[in-house]
Image (spheres, rainbow, N blue to C red):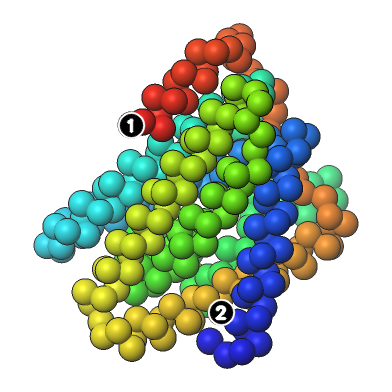
């Protein structure tokens, strides 16, 4: 990774971390942040489960076990964020009922991610399917994301106020997620070292770190085009059940799981 990319990495990740911390601390923007993470964490579960099954078939029992644990963790993370939303009387929007395009005929921003489009530039959707995904791409691309997420989640948790039971409970949940993400990054790094020399591992990490920098720039560019507006990912809780102390208790059980 060259010096300019390194500087952009430091500036970009710092700005992104500050922005996430600011948004989750603000009660007005907190629901959208929680919804985004719920979608990301829960959405990765089938992908990881398929990869686990594939590695078991290929005879790599160690990686199959790590992937199964990863999938289980991500499922629990999604539940923690869902509980956090429920305490705010919110839930993730039902994407099945959303239009494919806006009234202007443009793709609905909630259905696309400028970040991931740039992060996986050059790879087709077919190449990124878990049944055929190149193992080096899988190991390196989430390694960068998990490593950075562990730090981002810790920062986000630490800015949440502890005066109220709901935010205190959410803080503990996000801290547990940060710890899991650190573990995910560790096993992915080990997986790379099991399959290639350390010099090749570092080269691969540098490549995906550069992709992460470019993806952050793409995300910022998209945000500027929208005038700083972010699409809403939440709606009012549809269930007749209302947020109560029981929700906080169930969240605590998830943290301890």
Q: Secondary structure at mark 2?
A: helix
Instruction: Give how far across and how far down residue 249 sits, in percent.
Output: 46, 18
Instruction: Give how far across and how far down residue 2 sits, in percent.
Output: 57, 90
Q: Which residue is mark 2?
A: 210
Q: Crowding near pointer 2: few (<14 within 10 Å), some, many (20+)?
A: some
Q: Residue at x 21, y 74 (%)?
A: 194
**Callout in the foreground (1, 2):** 1
Position of the C terminus, as image quadrant, is top left
Residue 2 in the image: above or below residue 26: below
234, 9: nearer the viewer: 9
For residue 35, side relative to residue 78 (left or right) = right
Residue 255 in the image: above or below residue 228: above
For residue 160, side relative to residue 58 (left or right) = right
Instruction: Using the rendered view, name the quadrant where residue 165 is placed.
Output: top right
Residue 257, labelled with which disc?
Answer: 1
Which residue is most to the right?
A: 227
Q: Crowding near pointer 1: few (<14 within 10 Å), some, many (20+)?
A: few
Instruction: Give how far across and how far down residue 83 sits, in percent.
Output: 53, 27
Q: Residue at x 34, y 74 (%)?
A: 136
188, 102: nearer the viewer: 188
For residue 56, side relative to residue 35 (left or right) = left
Residue 76 in the image: above or below residue 248: below
For residue 107, side relative to residue 167 (left or right) = right
- Res 36 seen here: no
Instruction: Give the Cα distance between marks 1 and 2.
Output: 35 Å
Which residue is most to the front?
A: 163
- Res 156 seen here: yes
Mark earlier in primary sequence (1, 2): 2
Q: Residue at x 78, y 59 (%)?
A: 223
Instruction: Give how far across and how far down residue 183 sits, in percent.
Output: 35, 55
């Amino acid at each position: 990774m060259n010096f300019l990319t390194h500087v952009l990495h430091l500036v970009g990740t710092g700005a992104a971390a500050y922005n996430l911390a600011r948004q989750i601390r603000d009660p007005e923007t907190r629901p959208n942040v929680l919804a985004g993470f719920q979608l990301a964490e829960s959405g990765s579960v089938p992908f990881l489960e398929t990869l686990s099954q594939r590695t078991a078939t290929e005879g790599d029992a160690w990686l199959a076990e790590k992937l199964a644990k990863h999938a289980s963790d991500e499922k629990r993370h999604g539940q923690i964020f869902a509980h956090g939303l429920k305490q705010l009387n919110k839930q993730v929007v039902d994407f099945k009922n959303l239009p494919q395009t806006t009234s202007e005929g443009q793709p609905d921003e909630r259905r696309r991610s400028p970040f991931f489009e740039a992060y996986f530039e050059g790879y087709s959707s077919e190449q990124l399917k878990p049944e055929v995904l190149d193992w080096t791409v899988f190991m390196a691309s989430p390694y960068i994301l998990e490593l950075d997420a562990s730090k981002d989640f810790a920062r986000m948790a630490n800015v949440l106020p502890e005066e109220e039971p709901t935010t205190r409970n959410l803080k503990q949940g996000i801290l547990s997620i940060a710890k899991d993400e650190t573990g995910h990054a560790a096993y992915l790094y080990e997986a790379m070292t099991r399959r290639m020399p350390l010099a090749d591992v570092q080269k691969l990490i540098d490549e995906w770190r550069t992709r992460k920098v470019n993806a952050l720039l793409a995300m910022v560019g998209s945000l500027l085009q929208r005038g700083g507006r972010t699409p809403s990912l939440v709606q009012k809780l549809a269930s007749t059940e209302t947020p109560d102390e029981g929700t906080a208790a169930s969240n605590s059980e998830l943290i301890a799981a």
